[in-house]
Image: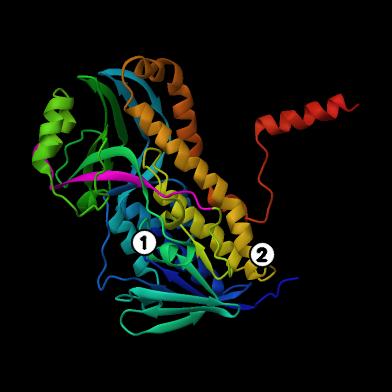
Amino acid sequence: MAERQSELKVAIIGAGLGGLTLAKALLQETAGAGRVCQVRLYEAWDEWKARGGSLGLAAGARILKRLNLGKELDAVSNRGQGMNYFAQGEKLGSLAVSGHFAMRTDLQRILVESLPADVIKLGHRLVDIVEDDAGARLSFENGATDFVDVVVAADGIHSFVRQKVFGADEPDFTGFRILYSISSKPIRPDPTMAHMHWMEKDGTGFAVLDVTAGQGESRHDICAVILRSKEPVSDRWDASIVQERFADLARHAAPDHEVLRRAAEAADVCFDWGVYRQPTRSSWISARGRVVLLGDAAHATAPFMGQGANMAMHDAWCLSRILLNEDLSLQEGLHLYEVNRKSHCENVVSQSSKVGEMATATGLRALARNYLLKPMILWNLSKAWATDPTERNPWEPEPMGLFQRLGLRLRAFCAK
């Protein structure tokens, strides 16, 4: 039987939404029953930076509410009620799911402000990590060191920890690029409904998404054009500011799309962003069992199901429940975390790329999508957005679905 510890020293590398959520969840519960966790969160940047634009939270919103941040979330988010789908201007249907849409900077801020100031260590760029049977030693560029029981790598798609501990690899280009505009001037008439337009122009498939994030002074209207690209495009959000390129694409792809036209005129900033995903790893746990991957460091995905941030926050919630459970050894707990999250997240990564392929389909494939595959696409999206990470603990059995229950009843009937 592996040794259990009543106290754990936890180092989180990376202060994105996954890392911040994990720190908050561990610290909120440490004062109660269960294992005590000492938490330090290390961020390479000297000041707060948040890459990206808006995020849609469903699972993530449920977690923030369990962390007593519901009021703060409501104050910075737009409560969306669903999405309307169109193809070549014809409305195909709607997806009636609710979610909170907010800017990443605002979500990061409410988590940071909820944490004790001494937990977060800015300006700590990790340069080395060494594991042994007793723990993991961290060395930082500024000369600081730390020795902890477990290291959680939440340092994103270009994770230093992943490369250092698990072996070198590179994120895979998915073949998609997104031209993305952010406008602080309202350009959408109905902020409660998002819109997805599937269209084809000169043999090229495009998908145009418009959505509103935030409210009041935090409101931003987002418009994104999704298309295929044979050549890799940078995934760095700060790599290019391309309003003219965005406007040219808008005029070519969808000259009659009113919100897209307004976005090209009113955008505060535009990005040309390549979409990448992480190669699959055989395990998220290091050989010595002292380092574990979380969020984009484990399973960076295409954004076409809106699950990247939600999965990272779900990882964090799951791992926090496990680390706080003093009945589980560290080795047992990390294995349980991987069992709960790995196959699910890898399935979402695969599905998300398929949704992107359907969104940019042309010809007969586009017709099949519009009239045959659309119900399946919407059902998968609805199922993903209905996920509630807080409804059970990781060590509890997952509730059976309808078909599983029917299967059990059929087997029982046949056994009579």
Query: Which is more toward the observer, 279 or 199?
Result: 279
Q: Amino acid at mark 2?
A: Glu
- Residue 345 - label: none
Query: Which is more toward the observer, 350 or 370?
Result: 350
Query: Which is more toward the observer, 357 or 35?
Result: 357
Residue at horizontal 44 percent and vertical 70 percent from the top: 12
Relative to 320, residue 3 above or below: below
- Residue 16 - label: 1
- Image quadrant where one finds the C terminus: top right
Q: Nearer the viewer, mark 1 or mark 2?
A: 2
| Horizontal and vertical percent position of residue 197 | 28, 26
Q: Find out whether residue 343 is within the magenta segment.
A: no
Q: Find out whether residue 277 is within the magenta segment.
A: yes
Q: CA distance from mark 1 to mark 2?
A: 26 Å
Q: Is residue 175 left or right of residue 408?
A: left
| Horizontal and vertical percent position of residue 395 | 67, 56
Residue beneath disc 2: 332
Residue lying at the far front of the rendered structure: 168
Dot 1 or dot 2: first in sequence order is 1
Q: Look at the numbered disc 1 and give the secondary structure of its residue.
A: loop
Residue span colored magenta:
265-281
To which quarter of the image does residue 190 belong? top left
Residue at horizontal 76 percent and vertical 70 percent from the top: 1
Q: Is residue 243 left or right of residue 46?
A: left
Q: Look at the numbered disc 2 and give the secondary structure of its residue.
A: helix
Residue lying at the far right of the rendered structure: 416
Residue at horizontal 16 percent and vertical 50 percent from the top: 240
Q: Is residue 380 left or right of residue 140?
A: right
Relative to 320, residue 117 above or below: below
Determine contact: label 1, label 2, CB under 8 Å: no
Can residue 261 be seen here? The reply is: no
Residue at horizontal 37 percent and vertical 42 percent from the top: 302
